[in-house]
Amino acid sequence: MSKKELIGLSKQELGSEIENIGEKPFRAKQLWQWIYFRGETDFAKMSNLSKDLRAKLAENFTITRPKIVTEQLSKDKTHKWLLEFTDGQRIETVYIPEEDRGAVCISTQVGCAVGCKFCHTGSQKITRNLTAGEIVAQFMVVRDAYGEWPSPTNETRMISNIVVMGMGEPLHNQENVFKALKILSDGDGIAISKRRITLSTSGIAPLIPSVATDLGVKLAISLHAPNNEKRSQIMPINKRYPIEEILTACQKYQDVMGMSRMITFEYLMLKDFNDSLDDAYELIALMKKYHLGAKFNLIPFNPWPGCDFQPSSNNKVHAFSRELEAAGYEAPIRVARGQDILAACGQLKSAKI
Ligand code: SAH
Ligand code: SF4
């Protein structure tokens, strides 16, 4: 009989596994702490469990990390891993350090079915969803690399935030992504607060309210255009879920989370496509109609081999930002990180060449 992998089981599922091998429920709690609070992968080192139990666990279960195929460090300290799972499928995970904190950018699928024209991942066909365990394990690989175990307190941790902005559309793999984020935010383990987790979606409108009702993390929407005509040209999914449906779903998210839980609208600045002042005015008029607690994040386009788009000029990006700010919206310009190792937004790709 093959051994069962424990990473990715919910607390309840872990409890059942422990019960199945004839142990008391509180053992599951201890095991959870070893796995997610201490980051331990070796049953033999779980010192508050009896020797017999340790042996029994090792007979029945595994705690594994994905294989690190390659690891790259950018000039700006952005760190990227190419990870391989047991079936040979690969994804990328990125850590983006700031001065006194940092975010892990996790992937949710091998490839992506949405096929946005500007995205390197989207040019790689979807192969499969990641399991909850494979999503959680990405974060654990980063913690391993920086030795940040046991889970430090909020104030001292360098790996402080999670952005679900890697490869894949998280709401196309909703069940596993939600399960993984619940494990990552659980207070007895890794304990990243839900306020420090952001899920970014291309706009799967019917599922957006569940980000509030079933999960409670922050929401980012990849908007990228001020009207349906333009958005459909670069994001084919817009024909299925047009902007109005997405923004109405965002209202439902904020009905549950409150207006103060700002929604970030990501807007990729593409040269001569969506970067004029008229585009900015149209975007402002659109957003005003929906009365959302909203802010923008202007994203300089990160080129990748074979793409058709060019980044907007600095002047245009700044002028665009000024208009949005004059209309009362925060509109910072995202600093591209890790471009030299293709680790920036939209540059991830893992297909074997
Ligand atoms: N699938 C989700 C999350 C992953 S993409 C989504 O689309 O929201 C994360 C962010 O990177 C999105 O806002 C996406 O639009 C952006 N992105 C994609 N390609 C990019 C590129 N070439 N340059 C900059 N950002 C890009
Ligand atoms: Fe998929 Fe997001 Fe890339 Fe679009 S931008 S192809 S949704 S990963």
Image: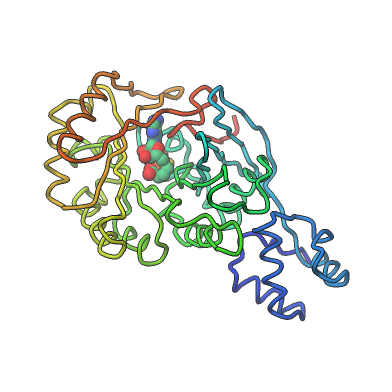
Give the left or right position of residue 158, taking residue 230 as reference.
right
Farthest residue, direction front: 155
Residue 301: give x, y in percent of width and height. Answer: 36, 27
Q: Is residue 6 above or below residue 195?
A: below
Residue 310: give x, y in percent of width and height. Answer: 33, 21
Depth check: 95 or 278 in front? 95
For the question of whether residue 115 can be seen, the reply is no
Depth check: 120 or 262 in front? 262
Q: Quadrant of residue 91?
A: top right
Check the picture and name the quadrant holding the C terminus: top right
Q: Quadrant of residue 94?
A: top right
Residue 9: give x, y in percent of width and height. Answer: 61, 65
Depth check: 232 or 158 in front? 158
Quarter of the displayed picture in which ligand 1 can be seen: top left
Residue 341: give x, y in percent of width and height. Answer: 54, 25
The total of numbered circles placed on residues is 0
Query: What residue sits 50% from the left and 42% below the top?
Result: 103
Query: What residue sits 32% from the left and 30% below the top?
Result: 333
Check the picture and name the quadrant holding the N terminus: bottom right
Query: What residue sits 65% from the left and 43% below the top?
Result: 84
Give the left or right position of residue 3, taking residue 263 as reference.
right
For the question of whether residue 108 can be seen, the reply is yes
Give the left or right position of residue 293, taking residue 137 as reference.
left
Farthest residue, direction right: 51
Q: Is residue 347 above or below residue 68?
A: above
